[in-house]
Image (cartoon, rainbow, N blue to C red):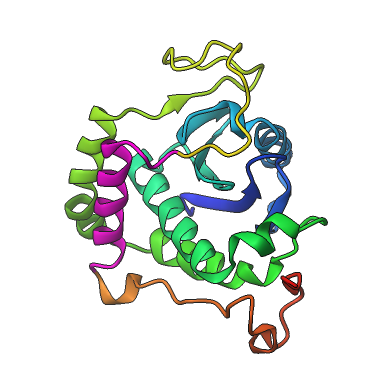
Amino acid sequence: MSMILFASIVRVRDGLPLSASTDFYHAQEFLECRRQLKALAQRLAQHPGRGSAESCDFRIYFLSSGDVACMAICSRQCPAAMAFCFLEALWWDFIASYDTTCIGLASRPYTFLEFDSVIQKTKWHFNHMSSSQMKSGLEKIQEELKSQPPAVVSLEGTDVANGLLNGHAPAHSEPDKRSNPGSANFARLSKTFYCGFPHLTVPRPHSAESPDEAGDSPGRPLPCS
């Protein structure tokens, strides 16, 4: 079974889903986890830039910076370092593909649905790493997570188990989560990892300025004008 099951890109300030993987899992537990992910997306502005939450047989991971967050549903066997590295890869590819104006102007869910092709390819690559590649590539990232532990978020409210938040922290409209050295080092380690193997290089999607390159993709980015 794959360890990374579902991924979504959301706008932090209001939780608007911008893109998501088109996976077809119909188990009731998974559908409930999808519902919880959607609810968590609505309050990402209250949480630190990296975190996770427990949901039945799955874990939800999120990573955010600026007004863009990447979220994933993973099996419990998925190492946290792998999940956060996967989200880091998605985050960089998404902001390289769509400028902040387009993201800010999005008014309907899944405006950038064509980004699903990138999500699927990236997810496939991470799910098909060999155990030796995973072990050698994730060791430094795991150490970084120990020194800069992600938040553990309760799905019952806005409390955070590691004490970073207690449920009363104010929401921030433009959270900047990469300003501290720990986050910058994590981003560097993650990029080194997923670019270190030729078959793990994430393909670039078409840019927001070139919608015709989408081919038969089901979505179109909003115009920036």
- In the visual, does 196 lie left or right of 114? left
Percent coordinates x, y for residue 143 in the rendering: 20, 36
Question: Which percent across, then down, holds residue 216?
Answer: 73, 85
Query: Residue lying furthest right in this view?
Result: 108
In the visual, does 188 lie left or right of 76?
Answer: left
Name the residue: 30% across, 59% down: 191
Count of numbered labels shown in the rendering: 0
* Residue in front for this viewpoint, 136 or 11: 11
Is 36 placed above or below 200 here? Answer: above
Q: Is residue 183 magenta-colored?
A: yes
Q: Main secondary structure of the magenta part?
A: helix
Q: Is residue 53 left or right of residue 42?
A: left
Q: Quick check: 28 left or right of 46?
A: right
Specify whether residue 13 is painted magenta: no
Camera-side residue: 76 or 198?
A: 198
Could you tell me which residue is drawn at 24 percent across and 52 percent down?
189
* Quarter of the rendering containing residue 50: top left
Judged from this view, the residue extending furthest toward the front is 225
Quarter of the image that includes the C terminus:
bottom right
Q: Measured along the vertical axis of the image, is residue 6 above or below residue 79?
A: below
Q: Position of residue 138 (x, y in %)?
A: 24, 49
Q: Position of residue 112 (x, y in %)?
A: 69, 66
The residue depicted at 76 percent of the width and 58 percent of the height is 106
Query: Is any atom of residue 106 visible in this view?
Result: yes
Q: Can residue 21 be seen in the rendering of this structure?
A: no
Range covered by the magenta-colored residues: 177-196
Please give the name of the residue rendered at 36% of the width and 48% of the height, measured from the top-left corner.
82
